[in-house]
Amino acid sequence: MFEPAILVLEDGTRYTGRAYGAQGTTFGEAVFATGMTGYQETLTDPSYAGQIVIQTAPQIGNTGVNDEDNESRRIWVAGYAVREPSRIVSNWRATSSLDDELERQGIIGISHIDTRALTRHLRDKGAMRAGIFSGDAAALSPDEQLKQVLASPHMAGQNLSAQVTTPEAYVEPAVGQSHGNIAIIDLGVKRATVRKLAAQGFDVHVLPYTATFEDIQRLEPVGVFFSNGPGDPAASDDVIGTLREVLGHRIPFFGICFGNQLLGRALGLGTYKLPFGHRGINQPVLDKATGRVEITAQNHGFAVQADTEGVIDSPEGFGRVEVSHIGLNDQVVEGLRCLDIPAFSVQYHPEATAGPHDASYLFDRFRELVLSGQGAATDVQASGLEGDDK
């Protein structure tokens, strides 16, 4: 016997299906993810905190879940919507089925809805608040369900770093000879990112988002990294203040995703909310310096506001800045390069789990920036580190 479930959007649109995972009521921003694979990495990506994720792939759960592919300590999505859950698990690494794991972690989902129609609706109208109602909540009147959705918080203005950051600092030792300490400010970091930096020969110190510049300085870091994460960058003034101190002391800096948005704001640029964001593992990005098009993994609903051509003078006094990468679907800023201080960032996920590895060279670029001591990201560009095979 299948229990009913209903997904309600804030504009009143309703989708009726079956309960999937835990039952009850949940609210979040409805967004769609276009990856054909890697649902376990998606679910455990802290950047999805506060969001009801709709998978555009028609069947989900084929490979179950395992103990090795989690990108963080738990599932973070606020809710989960799929077209057709796989009836069987077909992978030797699986330790559980996806629906059992969703139920175990209390993640409320819905299945057997037209996710294609839902995705097209969100592309036309934009990401919006939503609720999933199952169990006793499915029997509430449509008016009451919509009332509860409209009472839930908007994503704009939310600082969600406190929910997803590490509760205490930890260290991932360097692989091979150590080149020094890297400080990661954990705004929702993925395990693959930590491993990638350790593989570059750094002792990686992962710090809570509340870490001050003094906490960073005590590590005597050779570089600082700001991770991906959920929420509105305009609601992170304390972290932006810490980043400005890092930039002012000319410590080499690399930021991804949320870290890119925070670098933009630290430089004095604005950020804004995208209509429906970029989420998935097939987003094309142009590297302006090389002319190369990279297929990238992305998960963001906000972006940096900046001219994509020419050189910008940082309103906060950090010298010249240029947009280094552009999204080819909609011309969104996908990267920043500082020309007078050692700092750069990208809007996507170069660690790419799951996803393409076109952008993994950026970790090489950061290592060379740290080791060069030249004081400008352009020096790294000149080193010729333009691809995975370099």
Image: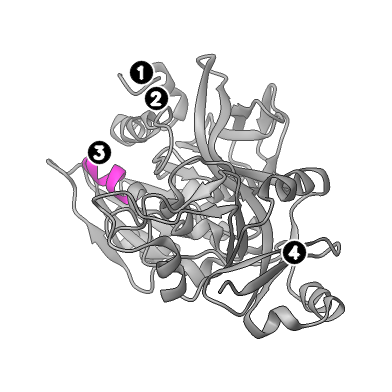
**Residues tagged 4 and 2 counted as in contact (Cβ below 8 A):** no
Q: In which quadrant of the rendered image does the C terminus lie?
A: top left
| Residue 42 image position (x, y, % from top left) | 48, 52
Characterize the local packing of mark 4: few (<14), some (14-19) or many (20 or more) Cα atoms within 10 angstroms.
many
- Residue for point 37% across, 56% down: 64
Characterize the local packing of mark 2: few (<14), some (14-19) or many (20 or more) Cα atoms within 10 angstroms.
many
**Residue at image mark 3:** 200
User: Tag on residue 383?
Assistant: 1
The mark lying in front, picked from 4 and 2, is 4
195 is higher (above) or lower (below) than 77: above
**Residue at image mark 4:** 129
**Residues tagged 1 and 2 counted as in contact (Cβ below 8 A):** yes
Front-lying residue, 203 or 93: 93
The mark lying in front, picked from 4 and 3, is 4
The mark lying in front, picked from 1 and 3, is 3
**Residue at image mark 2:** 380
The mark lying in front, picked from 3 and 2, is 3
Q: In which quadrant of the rendered image does the N terminus lie?
A: bottom right
| Residue 327 image position (x, y, % from top left) | 63, 30
| Residue 8 image position (x, y, % from top left) | 76, 66
Disc 2 secondary structure class: helix
Amino acid beneath label 3: Gln
The secondary structure that dominates the magenta segment is helix
Amino acid beneath label 1: Ser
Work out how far the residue at label 1 is from the one at label 3, CA to CA, in angstroms: 17 Å
Q: Is residue 199 within the magenta segment?
A: yes
Front-lying residue, 233 or 216: 233
Q: Earlier in the sequence, mark 4 or mark 2?
A: 4
Front-lying residue, 332 or 355: 355
The colour scheme used here is: one colour
Q: Earlier in the sequence, mark 4 or mark 3?
A: 4
Which segment did they paint magenta?
194-201
